[in-house]
Image (spheres, rainbow, N blue to C red):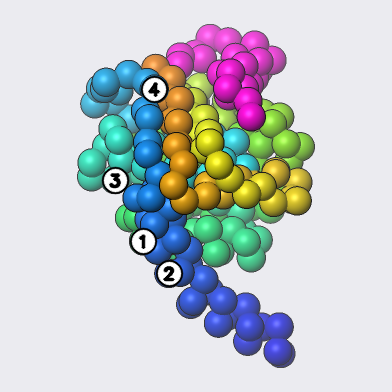
Amino acid sequence: MRKKFFRALALIIVPFIGSVIIRILYLTNKKNFHGPESLGDENFIMACWHGELLMIPYAYTRYKKNPHVKLVISEHFDGNLIARTLSFFKFGTIRGSSTRGGAKALIRSIKELKSGCDLGITPDGPKGPRHEVADGIIVMAQKAKVKIVLVEIKPSKFWQLDSWDKFVIPKPFGVIDYYISDLVDISGMDIEEARNLIKEGLVKYEF
């Protein structure tokens, strides 16, 4: 009973505080965006590693000023926290992962993409292995016939958690480099070819 109470309390307090912290960290860092001037008008899947997820809203809003995007987030408790935090940035969510609710999330994601919505995904989430690309992003892109944007987010100063994804939190008063790819087309590729292309595009600028 006590655990349920504290979790319910955390779902009210933590997302708001988290959204404020994200904004403060963004504002107190210098930002460098390395990528195309425009991604055009077509919808896409934006992908980054799970450990670099914290500052992803600003990579998306660099190109889409009025968010029309949903992120695929796990149905675990930490997924609830992430979903509610991102709601402060006007990001919707699709709940499910490879370990829980996966088929439902896959079907809904393809449907949302076909309707014109953008999609955000962490190819190695929600529980890893770290920096390994699961099949979901490939199936979504090919079935919905959309392209992928690969994003790496590299702060010059950061805390790194001792978690499976080595989650990165930028420190204030540094530099955050955003490396954003052009639209990547994986239509017609087999699973392994697409997986290798996505992985190579997300490890160009390792810490």
Spatial CA distance of label 2 from label 3 is 19 Å
Q: Give the range drawn in magenta.
A: 183-207
**Mark 2: which amino acid?**
Phe
**Mark 4: which amino acid?**
His
Spatial CA distance of label 2 from label 4 is 29 Å
Q: In this view, does 128 lie to the left or right of 115?
A: right
The quarter in which the N terminus is drawn is bottom right
Q: Residue at x 30, y 44 (%)?
A: 68
Q: Name the residue under label 2.
A: 16
Q: Mark 3 points at which residue?
A: 67
Q: Residue furthest bottom?
A: 1
Measured as percent of width and height from the top left, residue 152 is found at 52, 30
Measured as percent of width and height from the top left, residue 139 is found at 57, 27
Find residue 123 and report its image quarter.
top right
Q: Which residue is drawn at 55% across and 42% down?
A: 157
Q: Mark 1 points at which residue?
A: 88
Q: Sequence-wise, which precedes: disc 4 or disc 3?
A: 4
* CB within 8 Å, label 2 to label 1: yes
Q: Residue at x 62, y 61 (%)?
A: 78
Q: Name the residue under label 4.
A: 34
Which is nearer the eye, 152 or 27? 27
Label 2: element kind: helix
Find residue 77 and report its image quarter.
bottom right
> Local crowd at mark 4 within 10 Å, few (<14), some, or many (≥20)?
few
Label 3: element kind: loop
Q: Residue at x 27, y 20 (%)?
A: 37
Which mark lies nearer to you, 4 or 3? 4
Find residue 33 and report its image quarter.
top left
Depicted 150 relative to depicted 73: above or below: above
Spatial CA distance of label 4 from label 3 is 21 Å
The quarter in which the C terminus is drawn is top right
